[in-house]
Amino acid sequence: MPASRTPRPPSAAATPSVPVIPPLLPGGSDDAVPILLVDDQPANLDALEASLATTGCKFVLARSADAALLALLDQDFAAIVLDVMMPGMSGFELTTMIKRRERTRQVPILFLTARMLDQQDELRGYSAGAVDYLTKPLDPLILRAKIAVFVDLYRKRRALSRMNLELQRQIGERQKMSAELARVNADLEARVGERTAALAEVGRRKDEFLATLAHELRTPLAALRTASEALRLKVPDNADLVTLQGVFQRQVQQLTRLTNDLLDVSRITRDKLTLQRRRVPLAEVIHTAVETVRPLAEKRNQTVNVVAPSEPVHVDGDPARLCQVLANLLDNAARYSPQGARIDLTADLSGPHVLIKVTDKGAGIERELMPRIFELFVQGQKSQPDEGGLGIGLPLARRLTEMHGGTLTAYSAGPGRGSEFVVQLPILVGEQPGDRGAARPEVPAKLARQRVLIVEDNQDTATMMDIMLKGWGQETRIAHDGLSALEVAKQFRPQVVLLDVGLPKLHGYEVARRLRQQDWAQNAHVVAITGWGLDADRQGEAAGIDHRLLKPVDPQTLHSLLLSMQRSGNRASA
């Protein structure tokens, strides 16, 4: 059996002239490097151990090949000092067996020999795996020097092994952390996805709510607006009733404007807003916008001063939307200006653009509010606390301006120092025939008597429209659902059908389609009235819809439409 011994100092008699070499390994015996000493002679083992005592190594002594193999099975060694000539199994044969094992293949082996070996024996030893030969009697200095090399290699190998284990541990930890981060990231992405989907659903429901709210508000507004016009026609000479009708009309117009803004915001957020573009005289847009805001300005005893180019200026745009932009700016200026204030609207040419400025000397805009002035639902301090508004006029005006290829900017010197809003729009170059007279308002003409069928499920709206149309000299009939509309039309044979789209029993488009199947209805004018918007659709066109009006119907717009249809004659030339 191999014997393990701790280092002991050499006796003076054994090595009288050998200098003391410091230990190669600092620390105690637990850090001592193991060396396997194999020799069949105990005296030789004692001499080897004594020579290496100062190295601080730990020695395992084996007196046979079998004992050496048992020691190698038990632990690893920095080096093996092996006697070549041993009974039973020689050093060469033992070396061959050591080199066959994966675990011990790299252990360096120093052969000890008491005689000079011939070249063939040396080659045999090196071929078996020995790294060097030492001749007895041994020189302790040479032995320690050679062992020191192997001890140093063993120590470095052991340090590398520990570093590798630590590295593997760190890699394992990082892999765990990476897996945990991946899990957390996946969980976060899933939660973000769920949150995004939830926000999208909330946004969709909000848009649907706004659109539905705007639509539902239009039905009572249609009745109120038509009733206002009917009241005006019934009592033209009663001053008190005329005053009441004026208040009634102005408030309905304000509600209609807020409703339209709500629906427009809903369309913009859903990217559903489209423009009906044409060549538009700028003077016409300015005139309509000023007239739109005039009731509010007169209520506050304010004046709107307009300065525009004397020559015709045209832009490519949707006249209703451009008017909405300027009306929103003028309305904003009126609400943020005191009683009796003056509001200026100026239009100047600047190269290929026109600059339209709306200036007031009212409440002004705080510096902190200026970067957010065009955000939805942001409002400053009004001059009158009771003035209404939803905070969507300016954002809507900017978006509509941008859709026309223009810009809308705001300036203010601060609170109490007024504001200026500047609209920049590209202009059309070149005058077209009739441009100079385009801005002149047409004098209202009297309508000729014609048969008009009112198809409306809301009885108040239908009744008020009936009174208004009769006040214009029209012959009317009323139907409250799609099926009865077809029956009334069959007997009445209207020249104009004012058709609500959302009807009970039969959809408005289906009513129009069935009407068009009658010979007498080929030249009739079918006007769809809707609370959902004026966007054309293929279904309506296929059903034979000629025109679309938005609830609540503007009496002046309807009057002008009826007049134009009379002048055009039948539908084919409309």
Image (cartoon, rainbow, N blue to C red):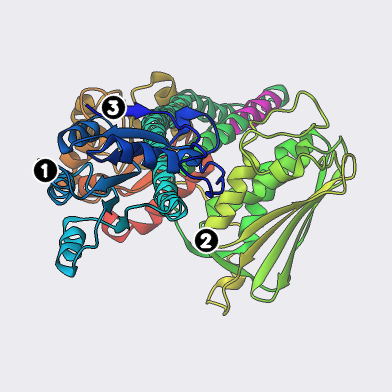
**Quadrant in which residue 526 is drawn:** top left
For image coordinates 39% across by 38% down, the residue present is 49
Residue placed under numbered mark 1 in the picture:
89
**Quadrant in which residue 355 is drawn:** bottom right
Front in this rendered view, residue 505 or 161: 161
Image coords of residue 154 (percent x, y):
39, 45
Front in this rendered view, residue 314 or 27: 27
User: How many labels, in total?
Assistant: 3
Image coords of residue 75 (percent x, y):
28, 32
Of tags 1 and 3, which is closer to the observer?
1
Three-letter amino acid code at disc 1? Met
The local crowd at label 2, few if under 14, some if 14 to 19, many if 20 or more residues have their Cα within 10 Å, is many
N-terminal label among 1 and 2: 1
Label 1 with label 3: CB-CB less than 8 Å: no
Residue 448 visible in the picture: no
Residue range corresponding to the magenta coloring: 242-253
For the C terminus, which image quadrant? bottom left
Of tags 2 and 3, which is closer to the observer?
2
N-terminal label among 1 and 3: 1
Residue placed under numbered mark 3 in the picture:
503
Three-letter amino acid code at disc 3? Leu
Helix, strand or loop under label 1 = loop
Determine whether 535 is above or below 499 in the image.
below
Front in this rendered view, residue 246 or 266: 266
Front in this rendered view, residue 413 or 558: 413
For image coordinates 36% across by 36% down, the residue present is 46
Q: Main secondary structure of the magenta part?
A: helix
Helix, strand or loop under label 3 = loop
Residue placed under numbered mark 2 in the picture:
317
